[in-house]
């Protein structure tokens, strides 16, 4: 009974919040000097904790696609094992990487994601939007395989029982070479966008965000030069004048511009391990507080007293060294999972889950000076 009430509350909250806005998440890809590729993202939601877990999916695990009428959708088996972060204690994967170094992030895209029409005759080739992450991470190892394979599967909208609405989403996918694409469904058609900048936020469509960058060509990593007007010298009042005009609000278009600006002026890093540090620094710029406008869903939750931030967790996936690094709203200490150490072929047939926070408190080291 308690679970039914919780599901009803969640559905009501999301119906009032997500139908007109998007989760305020930001994704960034960085490439080190030696070619190591790091992808990461922030996960924002201000109404309640998503209770995400680390999910380890074995090679050979069988999924069955969902359909609107309850018919069995496409049955597919994971060719590759993968690690992902789920949501709402379901195998609803939002972020992950497979054993071949292919990463994926799901980002909400309400008001713009329109999937193909479902037909019962096509059920055996159908998966729901909430299963795209499972399908891509389990099936492909390169961006070219993603390009070739996605047109062959029918992705449709199915109401997700845990939240009470259709999952409107788009996805960024990156392989270990650093090539990235953004996958969207617009007006019922699949569109795969090249994403050379490795940036994603939410609405509108990805090509709109790329066009909008033309409005910010004045931004620079260098300070503005002093100018003389009528014999009077005017100089910048301090560092940062090259970024005057950078939008500071938390809407998806503004976050997209900021993510491009910060990633394009990021500190040059030698390898993937050092690039993880830099990516976390960049993603710190997108942390959002709790509050009436802290993130989507803010002000509607009943359990926000259990939260410390609208940014619930932040990931950095080292696609070259196959590691997961993350921290959470409760504990800024970075947790590390070596995916190379997992034998995905000897896990059995069950998904293994790991809780993100053993304790929902900051891990603090107490210094004891020798006096």
Image: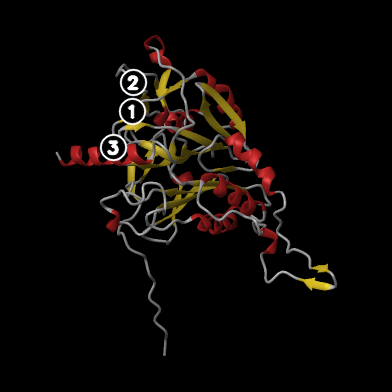
Q: Residue at x 30, y 33 (%)?
A: 164
Q: Earlier in the sequence, mark 3 or mark 1?
A: 3
Q: Earlier in the sequence, mark 2 or mark 1?
A: 2
Choose top left, top right, bottom left or bottom right for residue 353: top left
Q: Nearer the viewer, residue 72 or 27?
A: 27
Mark-to-mark CA distance, 3 and 2: 17 Å
Disc 2 vs disc 1: Cβ atoms closer than 8 Å?
yes
Q: Nearer the viewer, residue 292 or 363?
A: 292
Q: Element at badge 3?
A: helix
- Residue 85's x, y, as percent? 40, 43
User: Within 10 Å of the Cα at label 3, are there few (<14), some (14-19), or many (20+) other Cα atoms?
Assistant: some
Say if 81 sits above or below 371 in the image.
above
- Residue 366's x, y, as percent? 38, 76
- Residue 103's x, y, as percent? 52, 39
- Residue 209's x, y, as percent? 60, 40
Q: Nearer the viewer, residue 356 or 213?
A: 213
Quarter that holds the N terminus: top left
Along the horizontal axis of the image, is 330 left or right of 326? left
Along the horizontal axis of the image, is 328 left or right of 279? left
Mark-to-mark CA distance, 2 and 1: 7 Å
Q: How is the image coloured?
A: secondary structure
Would residue 185 be visible to someone looking at this image? yes
Q: Element at badge 1?
A: strand
**Badge number at residue 68:** 2
Most distant residue in the left direction: 1
Would residue 177 be visible to someone looking at this image? no
Residue located beneath label 3 in the image: 11
Q: Residue at x 69, y 64 (%)?
A: 241
**Badge number at residue 159:** 1
Say if 116 sits above or below 285 in the image.
above
């Amino acid at each position: 009974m308690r679970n039914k009430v919780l599901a009803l509350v969640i559905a009501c909250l999301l119906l009032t919040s997500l139908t007109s806005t998007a989760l305020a998440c930001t994704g960034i890809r960085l490439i080190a000097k030696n070619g190591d590729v790091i992808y990461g993202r922030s996960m924002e939601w201000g109404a309640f904790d998503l209770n995400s877990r680390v999910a380890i999916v074995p090679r050979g695990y069988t999924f069955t696609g969902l359909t609107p009428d309850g018919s069995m959708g496409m049955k597919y088996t994971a060719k590759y094992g993968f690690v992902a972060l789920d949501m709402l204690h379901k195998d609803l994967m939002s972020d992950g990487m497979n054993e071949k170094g292919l990463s994926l992030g799901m980002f909400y895209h309400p008001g713009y994601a329109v999937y193909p029409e479902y037909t019962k005759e096509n059920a055996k080739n159908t998966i729901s939007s909430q299963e795209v992450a499972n399908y891509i991470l389990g099936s492909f190892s390169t961006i070219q395989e993603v390009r070739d394979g996605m047109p062959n599967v029918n992705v449709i909208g199915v109401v997700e029982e845990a939240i009470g609405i259709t999952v409107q989403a788009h996805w960024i996918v990156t392989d270990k070479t650093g090539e990235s694409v953004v996958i969207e469904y617009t007006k019922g058609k699949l569109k795969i966008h090249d994403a050379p900048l490795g940036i994603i936020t939410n609405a509108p469509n990805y090509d709109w965000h790329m066009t909008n960058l033309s409005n910010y060509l004045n931004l620079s990593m260098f300070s503005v030069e002093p100018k003389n007007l009528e014999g009077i010298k005017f100089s910048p009042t301090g560092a940062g004048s090259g970024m005057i005009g950078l939008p500071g609000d938390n809407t998806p278009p503004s976050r997209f511009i900021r993510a491009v600006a910060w990633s394009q002026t990021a500190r040059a890093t030698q390898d993937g391990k050092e690039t993880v540090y830099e990516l976390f620094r960049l993603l710190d710029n997108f942390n959002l507080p709790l509050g009436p406008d802290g993130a989507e869903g803010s002000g509607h939750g009943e359990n926000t007293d259990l939260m410390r931030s609208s940014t619930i967790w932040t990931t950095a996936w080292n696609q070259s060294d196959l590691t997961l690094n993350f921290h959470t709203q409760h504990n800024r200490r970075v947790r590390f999972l070596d995916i190379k150490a997992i034998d995905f072929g000897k896990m059995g047939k069950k998904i293994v889950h790991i809780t993100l926070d053993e304790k929902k408190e900051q891990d603090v080291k107490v210094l004891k000076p020798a006096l």
